[in-house]
Image (cartoon, grey):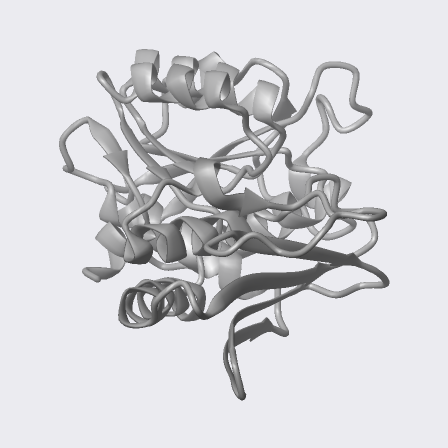
Amino acid sequence: MSELPGIVITGASGRMGQMLIKTVVASDKCKLVGVVERAGSDWIGRDVGEAMGGAPLGVTVTDDALAVFAHAQAVIDFTAPAATVEFAGLAAQARCVHVIGTTGMTEDDLKKIASASRHATIIRAGNMSLGVNLLTKLTKMVAAALDADYDIEIIEAHHNRKVDAPSGTALMLGEAAADGRGVKLEDVRDSGRDGITGARKKGDIGFSAIRGGDIIGEHDVMFAGEGERIILRHVASDRSLFAKGALKAALWGQGQKPGEYDMLDVLGL
């Protein structure tokens, strides 16, 4: 029997789910042992390779998450908040690593995930790429070096099918900027400008969201002062970088103690 860690992918029919499946199948460091779809999906009961339009992979799509989690070492999950919260509890029961790339979660969702992390290794990040996580570190450093005379604005762009705004990555960058300033993001966040809003409040961290076409992901962190602007930027041109980062996290999580981790932990940053 192979000793390679077994990986389960949730949300198999989605673009990210299919990219994750391809990434796991192409890897020589793990094996695909399960794929999960929502109840009622026409993928249920089909070989996932055939459902994706290719050759059979010997893995049948199921809506019984716990059954496949029980035979896996890690679950990679880029779905929706309600599904991710449910999967967190099931992954904790199965004692498998849960890698979460889902965004748009509420404080209540995060509390439930934190509760699950008492029994399981959970790695959650708004973005799984090396470049974005380096950008996060730089954002915190620059925010700490510049005072509130420099306005911070986070501008993000994504495809027209993204359902949440600001993006999880934008919020991650906002948290980094707030940490650098020594404040809580919830106290200085400004992401609802419309109409006569009045002058910008000093010290606020602003968010602007663009949605259009097939943009994979672009994030700018602007520090705007009198007479100059400093702009830190990351552009994603290939969605596979997120899948590769998520798989790296799933493999890193093997043997880690239960708790919540992020990609900075995975990358040693």
The total of numbered circles placed on residues is 0
Nearer to us in this view, 55 or 52: 52
Q: Is residue 13 left or right of residue 19?
A: right
Question: Which quadrant of the figure has residue 122?
Answer: top left
Residue at the far bottom: name it: 227
Q: Is residue 169 above or below residue 134?
A: above
Q: From the viewer's perspective, is 269 left or right of 85? A: left
Residue at 65% over, 46% down: 191
Most distant residue in the front direction? 198
Residue 66 image point, x, y percent: 46, 13
Q: Is residue 216 above or below residue 232?
A: above
**Residue, x 32% and y 11% (percent of image)?**
93
Q: Residue at x 44, y 62 (%)?
A: 129
- Measured along the vertical axis of the image, is residue 142 above or below residue 204? below
Question: As rendered, which of 31 and 131 lies closer to the eye?
Answer: 131
Task: Give residue 212's quadrant in the image.
Answer: bottom right
Task: Name the residue at 66% across, 44% down.
Answer: 56
Q: Quadrant of the N terminus?
A: top left
Percent position (x, y) of residue 73? 31, 32
Frontmost residue, 150 versus 233:
150
Pinpoint residue 16: horizontal percent, then vertical percent. 63, 48
Residue 50, x across and y down, in percent: 74, 43
For this view, does 170 lie left or right of residue 15? Answer: left
The one of 165 and 266 positioned closer to us in this rendering: 165
Quadrant of the image occupied by residue 206? bottom right
Q: The C terminus appears in which quarter of the rendering? A: bottom left
